[in-house]
Amino acid sequence: MSIQLTKSNQDVLNTETLSVIKFSSLTCGPCQMLANGAWPRLLEANPTAVQFLTVDSDVEHELNGNYHITGVPTVVFVKNGKELERLVGLNQQSAYQTAIDKLK
């Protein structure tokens, strides 16, 4: 399951569980490819050890600024409220999974 992250529920990031945040836009082709490809497979492959969140970059401008998002899709890996790594652009599922395995 993926949680919609907004400025009002950012407290969910202050946990020892790895949070994987996908910043995307409904009008972005690569974002839709991620949403319909690697993202659901990552959720399926990591059902409990990782918290998955999505940000609608068209709406959550404050979160975009907080995380210095300059392009979408961007996937940010956070633990205990601190950014550990990020992948910008559309990547292979294996790149996301490698980061998850390394950071969780």
Image: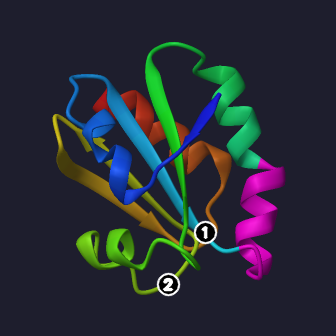
Q: What element does badge 1 sit on?
A: strand
Residue carrying label 2: 71
Is 95 drawn above or below residue 89 in the view shown?
above
In the foreground, 11 or 103: 11
Query: Which of the 4 quarters of the picture holds residue 59?
Result: bottom right
At label 1, counting other C-alpha atoms closer than 10 Å, the crowd grade (few under 14, some 14-19, many 20 or more) is many
In the rendered structure, does residue 67 fall within the stretch colored magenta? Answer: no
Residue type at the position of mark 2: Gly
Residue 4 rendering spot, x and y as whole percentages: 56, 47
Q: What element does badge 2 sit on?
A: loop
Is 26 drawn above or below residue 12 in the view shown?
below
Magenta range is 26-37
Q: Can you tell which mark lies on residue 24?
A: 1
Residue type at the position of mark 1: Ser
Quadrant into which the N terminus falls: top right
Q: Can you tell which mark lies on residue 64?
A: none
In the rendered structure, does residue 27 fall within the stretch colored magenta? Answer: yes
Q: Main secondary structure of the magenta part?
A: helix
Query: Which of the 4 quarters of the picture holds residue 15?
Result: top left
Residue 12 rendering spot, x and y as whole percentages: 32, 34
Quadrant into which the C terminus falls: top left
- Mark closest to the chain's N terminus, 1 or 2: 1
Identify the residue shown where x is 81% and y is 50%.
37
Residue 81 rendering spot, x and y as whole percentages: 18, 43
Q: Is residue 57 left or right of residue 78?
A: right
Identify the residue shown where x is 35% and y is 58%.
7
Query: Which of the 4 quarters of the picture holds residue 64?
Result: bottom left
C-alpha span from label 1 to label 2: 9 Å
At label 2, counting other C-alpha atoms closer than 10 Å, the crowd grade (few under 14, some 14-19, many 20 or more) is some
